[in-house]
Amino acid sequence: MIRFFMFLILEYFSVQLSNMKIFTAAQIREADAFTIKNEPISSPQLMERAAGKCAAWIGEHYSQQHPIYIFCGKGNNGGDGLVIARMLQQQGYTVSVGIVQNSSKASPDHILQLQALQKHSPSSLYEIGYITDFPALPANAVIVDAIIGTGINKPIEGWVAGIIHQINDQHHKHPIIAIDMPSGLMADVSSRHAPVVQAHHTLSFEFYKLAFLLPENAAFPGQVHILPIGLHPEYITHTPARYHLSDKEMMRTIYQPRDPFAHKGTYGHALLIAGSYGKMGAAILSAKACLHAGVGLLSCHVPQSGYQIMQISEPCAMCITDEGTDYNTHFHSSIDASSYKTIGIGPGLGTQPVTARSMELLLEAFPRPMVIDADALNLLSVYPYLLYKIPAGSILTPHPKEFERLFGATTNDVERLELLSKQAVKLQIYILLKGRYTAIACPDGAVYFNNTGNPGMATGGSGDVLTGILTGLLAQDYAPKAAVLLGTWLHGFAGDLAAAHLSQEAMTASDIISYLGKAFQEGL
Ligand SMILES: NC(=O)C1=CN([C@@H]2O[C@H](COP(=O)(O)OP(=O)(O)OC[C@H]3O[C@@H](n4cnc5c(N)ncnc54)[C@H](O)[C@@H]3O)[C@@H](O)[C@H]2O)[C@@H](O)CC1
Ligand SMILES: Nc1ncnc2c1ncn2[C@@H]1O[C@H](COP(=O)(O)OP(=O)(O)O)[C@@H](O)[C@H]1O
Ligand SMILES: [K+]
């Protein structure tokens, strides 16, 4: 009860966030309908606006030398394709339009746009009713996929799936541009094992779709370009979304500049419990990151064999040694809960049973949100009852394997996201599932995806750096939600700066720390 009350207080003081909402396919349909009714604008006009953005994008990226092969389905996604065809023809492109007979009935807007194109250029149109109707493409052709968008109701089957495979066979020969969604990809449910177009670019309207952010869909959307089509701001503002994408604007509302009259006490005293024989590097990376994230004071609790290593490596941190020579085994006894604002625990910690016992006593003694990572998470998976002792508002930072050990396996990424969110709500903590788009599940059920970072960060120690940053931000009195969103974003942004200057290959976790300063300066 006390834990929950404290959590409510922390939440109350967390900032109001601006953010990019990720709407479901059903909500997007509502947004279209709301816009049509209240802007007001007719449905065909809205389609002209959306398709116009796509035609302009294609015009900017491919010259008239490229014949454009557009594949249109019988719904409004196909309607977009028909408008794009007409607009590109007007600009002097050679356009060929295959109408994929994926449905017996065409949507009213499709029919309207088909009639317009028939009037304008009937020779460019042909029907695709079976796999053998797929055309031979000239060498420099560009493929536009407008077969199905957000209206897909189940995985594509039969000969239409065959058409998707034929488009994918062209992946290494021709650029493939998907309109709104790569055809076959379902916005809100798993598309695992379904046939989906493997696009190089997806021109998607107004919002990111959840499907673009899931690792299991990595092969499909290519580069995503969000094209605003003027959907009604009132709908966007007032409609709640469960999923959100972090952006710079959001970070600017979270970031708190330092007080000119501040002293080191203002920015909190953090304790880092980390390191073991052979894994002191993890502790040092976390300590350095915590300091570079702006913590007031940092103490590191390390095993005896790690004392000199830590003291020599990081003079800005204080050092406490454990009774254990090679492992931290008695850190609970050195902790006076009132001395530290927050704790970061886990990097390089080891998974000795005696460490688990000390962790249990620590969780019982420390009442405030802390950061739990790496081996501390592995201990939680061995002793799951400890999960219920974690202070409310704490932040857990598992990578997918650690997540699976903690909460079990799932059959697809959407199920895993559900499980992530369910556990965050149940335990009243933040759980950050690391990856290309790190998913941050909040105790209120919301999930935020982080949009910074790059594959150069797929290198040992990157996660230890994140733990240090989050611990540093919590110590400075950022509310847990603010700390987890800002810390994850800064970590990825520093990684992006490191990659830009050093290359993804050559950068190391230490370089993420080196660029943290630039991330504060340029990213906020
Ligand atoms: N006014 C609007 O509603 C706007 C809609 N827009 C476009 O419209 C799209 C949504 O249009 P719709 O709701 O008509 O849907 P779609 O065109 O995405 O898909 C529906 C069509 O696909 C067929 N279909 C669905 N599942 C299938 C499956 N598993 N196998 C084979 N065929 C299948 C349906 O029978 C129907 O013909 C968006 O993705 C976007 O491209 C944009 O033009 C913006 C404005
Ligand atoms: N391809 C990628 N794109 C964006 N971020 C990445 C990518 N690969 C790794 N990262 C980030 O790097 C960090 C790696 O953490 P983790 O796997 O725990 O590393 P370690 O255990 O070696 O410290 C995470 O924050 C993750 O989001
Ligand atoms: K499509």
Image (spheres, helix red, strand yellow):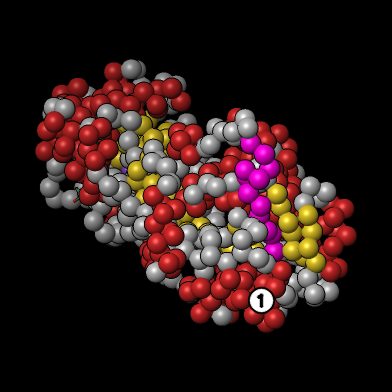
Mark 1 vs ligand 2: CB below 8 Å: no
Q: Residue sitting at 86 percent across and 59 percent down?
A: 309
Residue 136 in view in this figure = no
300 or 228, which is in the foreground? 300
- In the displayed structure image, the side of residue 151 where residue 331 appears, left or right: right
Using the rendered view, name the quadrant where residue 463 is placed: bottom right
Q: Is residue 146 above or below residue 41?
A: below
Query: Which residue is pictured at 19% across the width and 43% down the height?
Result: 30
Nearer to the camera, 253 or 38: 253
Label 1, secondary structure: give it. helix
Is any atom of residue 306 visible in this view? Answer: yes
Q: Is residue 38 magenta?
A: no
Q: Nearer the viewer, residue 229 or 157?
A: 229
The amino acid pointed to by label 1 is Ser
Report x, y in % for residue 423.
Answer: 42, 67
In the displayed structure image, the side of residue 309 where residue 492 appears, left or right: left
Counting from the top left corner in percent of width and height, residue 515 is at 69, 38
Of residues 298 and 427, the one nearer the viewer is 298
Q: Which residues are magenta?
A: 262-273
**Residue tagged 1:** 358
Asked whether 269 falls inside the magenta stretch, the response is yes
Corner quadrant of residue 6: bottom left
Judge from the rendering whether residue 13 lies leftward or rightward of residue 295; answer left or right. Answer: left
* Dot 1 crowding, Cα within 10 Å, few <14, some 14–19, many 20+: some
Image spot of residue 501 (x, y percent): 71, 34
Where's the N terminus, which quadrant? bottom left
Is 435 above or below relative to 367?
above
In this view, 279 is above or below 112: below
Residue at coordinates 59% horizontally, 33% vertically from top-left? 259
Q: Quadrant of the C terminus?
A: top right
Q: Residue at x 41, y 54 (%)?
A: 9
* View extreme (top): residue: 91
